[in-house]
Amino acid sequence: MNETFDVLLGHRSIRRYTDEPVPDEVVRAAVEAGRWASTSSLVQAYCAILVRDPDTLAQLSRIAGDQSKVRRAGAFLVICADTRRHRLAAREAGTPYETRLEGFLVAAIDAALFAQNTCVAFESLGYGICYVGGLRNDLPAVDRVLEIPDGIYPLFGLCVGRPAEAPEARPRLPLDAVLFDERYPSDEAMLELLAAHDEEVAAIRERQGRTPGTWSARVAVQLSRPTRTDLAAYYTAKGADLG
Amino acid sequence: MNETFDVLLGHRSIRRYTDEPVPDEVVRAAVEAGRWASTSSLVQAYCAILVRDPDTLAQLSRIAGDQSKVRRAGAFLVICADTRRHRLAAREAGTPYETRLEGFLVAAIDAALFAQNTCVAFESLGYGICYVGGLRNDLPAVDRVLEIPDGIYPLFGLCVGRPAEAPEARPRLPLDAVLFDERYPSDEAMLELLAAHDEEVAAIRERQGRTPGTWSARVAVQLSRPTRTDLAAYYTAKGADLG
């Protein structure tokens, strides 16, 4: 369709990188592009902390569940929802700062839009990226390592590097299971779509010589027990009002 | 830098559109690109409802605070965090479905990444987009209008259309106020960055003949009283556990 579509449709999460570093000017260019993402009423409730120090990376890697890619990435960014600047502005203006779940949600969405634009920018330059939700395993530890103050809510990490692998695309749900005309479909219609997708995934896994599995089975196992159960308490302690 | 950077850096929220419709095949192509965004452990916790019915658009427009652009856009998408498919998969597998704030946050972030890729795709084809957070003014009403079932959490709308305006870029915070090396800066350093940005914004507004104003003053006013205070109760009633 065009070069941008090539980038978007060509996305594969990249978990192995060459030794080539990601220069500061590339990081700055990509984050500059991220900065032009849409933002709710211009609040720009996000920030990125670039981590290159090997000791720090080793600690973050352990927090993320011993993910060696965090240490080995050419660059690692910690993406945070940032309300601290807003609080500073309110303090200077002598006005109260009060938000509820709306404020937290806007900040999380703002940060995600910013991060995704940043990723597309990196990918357009031939770099590979991988989101690292594993930082949420222990956000108080992330705060200790990076000395992240109140009002800043780390959400996830981003590994960036020159790809040292060319993985196959991981199949996505069919378009008709995520884009609907006028109304959300019935459960029966959705179950049919999921069954067709499960068959497709099973066939792909068989062809790849992997253990049998489907999207539905995987999701059911994954969501059968709550994880990271301290998140609400953590974000609240950092200043978020989730009520 | 490259065509994709041109698209990303060229973003302006577009609020006025020509009468040219946005064909279904363009919507499908853009959402297809959205679908290839990163997603947490492949859960793909998002969906988009394409609304073209004029009566429905008129109702959504009213909910969003009488935003005529919702009625006048060439296409309007309601972007939702979608956990209903996961619940169906769990029900079929006979496993419990249990998530806490982690599940809600992952779904909101997944939906935002998906939406942002979709927007970049539209923009690469010469369409303009505008996020519409105003739907959160009254999400129970959005549910009634679109009959959105439990487990689906509408987050925002997206207007899409051929631009009938070419607005100036709205200045963003300086890169050094959002990208940090190793550590978050001190409040003093941040206040200096904000002061410099406020001066820049004030000068731009003066040049444009607009009422005086700065980013800090605007944000302080905006966040001085809680808004959309029923969001947590609403999402909880729809099935989210925010605890």
Image: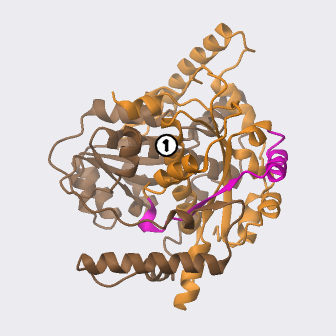
Chain colours: A orange, B brown
Q: Position of residue A164 (x, y in %)?
A: 67, 26
Disc 1 is attached to a residue of which chain?
A: A
Q: Is A199 placed above or below A121 here?
A: above
Q: Is residue B81 visible?
A: no
Task: Write down the region rendered in magenta.
Answer: A39-67
Residue under label 1: A121
Q: Nearer the viewer, residue A133 or B47?
A: A133
Q: Is residue A32 visible?
A: yes
Q: Is residue B210 left or right of residue A185?
A: left
Q: Position of residue B170 (x, y in %)?
A: 35, 65
Q: Would residue A53 be counted in the magenta stretch? A: yes
Residue type marked 1: Ala
Residue drawn at x 24%, y 75% is B208
Q: Would residue B219 be counted in the magenta stretch? A: no
For the C terminus of chain B, the quadrant is bottom right
Q: Position of residue B96 (x, y in %)?
A: 74, 39
